Every structure is written in structure tokens, then in C-alpha cells.
Image: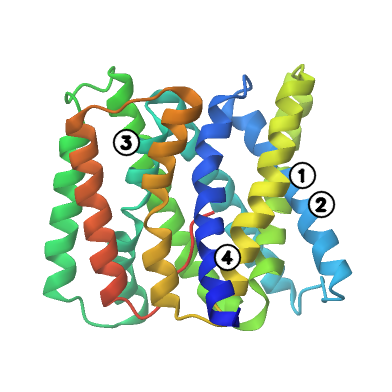
Amino acid sequence: MDEKTKSLIGLQISAICLSLVGVVSKLISQSSVIMVFVRSVFAAISLFLFLKVNKEKVLLQTRKDYLGLFLSGLLFALHIFFFFESVKASSVFIALAAIFTYPLMLAFLEPYFFHCRLSKSSILLALLAFLGVLIMVPEFELSNRTTQGVIYGVIAAGIFSINVIINKSYFKKYSETLVISYQNLTAALLLLPIFLIEQPIISTNDLSWLFFMGVILNLGGYILFYKSLRHVKAQTAGIISSVEPVYGLISAFLILGEVPVLKTILGGLLIVIASLAATLNSKSQVEPP
């Protein structure tokens, strides 16, 4: 089996792992804040051990880089928090579909930050994705839990898009694994005071799922994704990652018994189509955490 084929298989496994994060979060009884904290602790420890085993440097070059990745870690924690809130309020499929509005957000953010031209196709695709979001919203009432789930998911996508812009310069200087390690470490440190104040009672079952989420799904998802980029185009990786909502839909049905209504599936499908088209028009892609 050649390296390209291995990478394509690795990308599919990565998409499955990341799609399972939402499903696993539904099986945990803890609040979103506590889930983010414990998951980040497990992820940071496993990622720094991974770097150590591979004999990669773990120190950054400048104090400015530490401050920059601290900000990146803050945004990372907020992104994961709102994703978990989206899953709790609605469903795994809605949360994942809402998250994948991020390529369209990047299409609007990149011209502003990098002084490149905003294409007409980006505007049309953004309108298509917005239509998909509107279709998924059952009613325009903030008290509706599904509506809240869609809003939380879109907020998570927006935060991630901003973080992508920030991380672009760091991905040129450091490995993706190192950047993700510092993001998880920052998230854990920021949420440690809340954990100490709340002192939650975490069952063995919850701890097991959080370990699975933070270590297995994190390593399987992100490391396989970035390792695959050595042998396949980033555009191809972005296209494959767009099937995550589909995997999420299937796994949520099999594990949780979630069955989204036709209207929700149609809205999610429009978002995925817009995301795929945006990926084809993009020069670079970054996988959501």
C-alpha cells in the first residue's frame, strides 16, 4: 500500500474520530466547562508525550509566541465549549453541520486580514450556507433548544475561523502537534480555577469517556489528519473532512438513537455542499478541533 492510499485511509479514520466527539459528549453527565477542562488535560498530556517520544522541541522561540498561543488556547477552549453546548441543546448532526459553516466564514475573514480579494462565489456560497442554517432553525425563538443549538454551533464555527487566522503564522514556525498541545494546555490552565471551585464528582464512566475523547479521538483525529497532509493535497483533506456531519449522523443514530427530521437533514446538506464548494475554491484548509 503506497503512502497516498494510507493517507486517504487515515483521513477517513480522522473524520470518524472527530465526528464521534459530539456523540461521546452526549454520554457524559458533566457540564460543558468541566468536559472541556478534563478533556484538555488528557489531550495536553498525551500530545506532549507524543512530542517527547518523537523527540520534537516543546519550547517556543519567543515570549510573543507564548502570548499568541495563549490567546489561541483561549479561543480553542471557547470553541470546544460552544460546540458541546450546541450538542447538548440540539443534536450531534445539527452541531456538526453548524460547525461546517467555518469555511465560508474564512472566505470572508481572509480578505480582511490578508488583503486578498473577496470572490463573488464566496458570497453566493455564504448565502447558501446561511439558507441551510435558517432551514435547520425550527422557530426564531431563543427559548427553543434546537434554535439555541444552531446558534451555539455557528458561534463555535466563528471562533474557530478567527483562531485559524491567528494560527496561520504559528503553523509556519511550529508543528501542528505542538500548536495543538499548547492550545489544550492553555485551555486546561484557564479552566482549572473553575474546576477547583466547583469540585465536581466525576464518575468512573464519565472519566473513561473523557479519556477516550481527549486521548484516542484527539490523537486519532488530529495527528492522522496532519500526518496525511504530507502525502495528499490540503484541498483533498478538506473535502474528506466535510463528511464529518454524515458520520456524525450515522453514529448518533446507532449509538444515541437520534433521528433528525427531514428539514434538519436538508439544511445540513446545504451547509455541507457550500462547505465543499468553499473548500474547492480555497488554497488552504485547516481541520476544526
Disc 4 or 1, which lies upstream in sequence? 4
Q: Are marks 1 and 2 in contact (CB under 8 Å)?
A: yes
Disc 3 or 1, which lies upstream in sequence? 1
Disc 2 or 4, which lies upstream in sequence? 4
Q: Element type at marker 3?
A: helix
- Residue 138, image x and y in percent? 19, 25
Q: Element type at marker 2?
A: helix
Q: What residue type is labelled 2?
A: Ile
Distance in Å between CA atoms under marks 3 and 1: 28 Å
The quadrant of the rendering that contains the C terminus is bottom right
Q: Are marks 2 and 3 in contact (CB under 8 Å)?
A: no
- Residue at x 66% of width, y 29% of height: 34
Q: Badge 4 is on which residue? A: 10
Q: How crowded is mark 2: few (under 14 residues within 10 Å), some or many (20 or more)?
A: some
- Residue 267, image x and y in percent? 20, 41
Marker disc for residue 42? 1
Q: Badge 3 is on which residue? A: 151
Q: Quadrant of residue 203?
A: top right
Question: Which one is in front in this view, the residue at disc 2 or the one at disc 4?
Answer: 4
Q: Badge 2 is on which residue? A: 45
Distance in Å between CA atoms under marks 2 and 4: 23 Å
Q: Do the residues labelled 3 and 1 touch (CB within 8 Å)?
A: no
